[in-house]
Amino acid sequence: MSVRYLLMLNQATLLSLMILFLGSHSFADTEIFSKEKIESHKENVKKSNVENLFHRYSRLISSSTVDGSANCDDYKRFPGSILGQWDSAPKSLFFHNWKYRQETYEMLFATKADLAESIYSIALHTKDLDSTVSLSRFKRGAQGFHYSISQVVSWANSFARIPQKSHFAGSERFLSLLIEEKIVIRFSERFRAFGKVSHIIGAAPGIRRSLEKNLNHERWHVTWDHDVLFKNFYISKWCALSESEKESITKSFTGYNQDFESQIIEEWAVKQNEKNPIP
C-alpha cells in the first residue's frame, strides 16, 4: 500500500515528496462486531488516552464539515472530513463520486501546516519520513498523503504506547478523529479497522499547487493500488526505458529514497496522470 507526501525542501522551490510504502495489495483485516460486543468494550475505549483527546480537534473542524443540504446517507457514501477555516468549503471536490470514493476516507485541510501536524507521527513510524526532517520543515511543504487502513492500524497501536506525546499533538487529534468517525476502534486493548474504508487520503492547497490537483494526485495513488492494468502498463513502460532514462527520472524525484525503485515507478506514473480526471 502507499503513502506519499509533497515536501517543500526550501522556501523558494517546491519539491515533491510523495512517499510510497509498497507491499502486496491487501485490505484491512476488517472485523464487524456485534452491538453487544461493541457495548461491552465501550469502557475500554473510553479509557483510551488517545480517544479522550478528541475535543482538542475542534479548532480544526469548521462549520463547513457538514453540508446542511446533505443527509446522513450522503456521508455514508462519501466518508471523510473538511477541516479548518475556509472562505468557501470545497464541497464539490469532497462529494465527487469517483470509482473508489466509498472506500476512501478523504480529509481536506485548509492549510498544509495542519495536514503536516496530523500525519507527522505516522510518517516517522512508517519510515517514509527521515527522522532528521523536523515538523517545522515538514509543515512548510506537506500537501498530500495516502495511507492504507492497515498502515493506520499499525501506527495507532504503536502510537498508543508512546508515553509522552506533547510533540505529536496534531497526530493525537488525527487519531482521535479516526476513532470518533469509527474508522478504527479499540478492541481487546488493540486498535482494529472498522467498516469498509480501506484508504485514508488527505490534501491541502499549496503555493503553486491547487487543492484540486493535490487531491486528484492522491486519488490516482488509490487507483494505482486497485487497477492492475494501470499499474502493469506503467511498470512495462518503465522496464522498456534505458538505464540512463531511468536514472534521469529517479534523480528528478529529489525528495525520495533513490534506492526505492517501486516508489519511483508509482510516483512517475501518478505524476503523468495527476492532471487527468480521476475515473
Image (spheres, grey):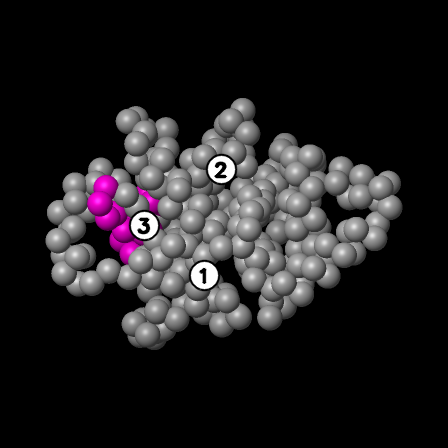
In three-dimensional space, the C-alpha distance between marks 1 and 2, rounded to whole angstroms, equals 20 Å
Instruction: Please state which amino acid type lies under the numbered disc 1.
Output: Thr
Q: Secondary structure at mark 2?
A: loop
How many numbered callouts? 3
Seen in the picture, residue 123 relative to 26 is either above or below; the reply is above
Q: Position of residue 5 (x, y in %)?
A: 56, 44
Q: Nearer the viewer, mark 2 or mark 3?
A: 3
Q: Are marks 1 and 3 in contact (CB under 8 Å)?
A: no
The quadrant in which the C terminus is found is: bottom right
Mark drawn on residue 126: 2
Mark 2 crowd level (few <14, some 14–19, many ≥20, 10 Å Cα): some
Instruction: Residue under label 1, please give it.
Output: 104
Q: Position of residue 239 (x, y in %)?
A: 79, 51
**Residue 88 shown left or right of residue 237 in the figure:** left
Give me the residue at 28% from left, 43% from top. 190
Choose the circle earlier in sequence order: 1 or 2: 1
Q: Are marks 1 and 2 in contact (CB under 8 Å)?
A: no
**Residue 263 shown left or right of residue 45 in the figure:** right
Instruction: Please state which amino acid type lies under the numbered disc 2.
Output: Thr
**Residue 245 shown left or right of residue 40 in the figure:** right
The residue lying toward the viewer, choosing from 61 and 30, is 30
Seen in the picture, residue 153 relative to 80 is either above or below; the reply is above
The residue lying toward the viewer, choosing from 189 and 121, is 189
On the image, which quarter does residue 245 sit in? top right
Mark 1 crowd level (few <14, some 14–19, many ≥20, 10 Å Cα): many
The question of residue 117 being in magenta is answered with no
Choose the circle earlier in sequence order: 1 or 3: 1
Mark drawn on residue 192: 3
Q: Secondary structure at mark 3?
A: strand
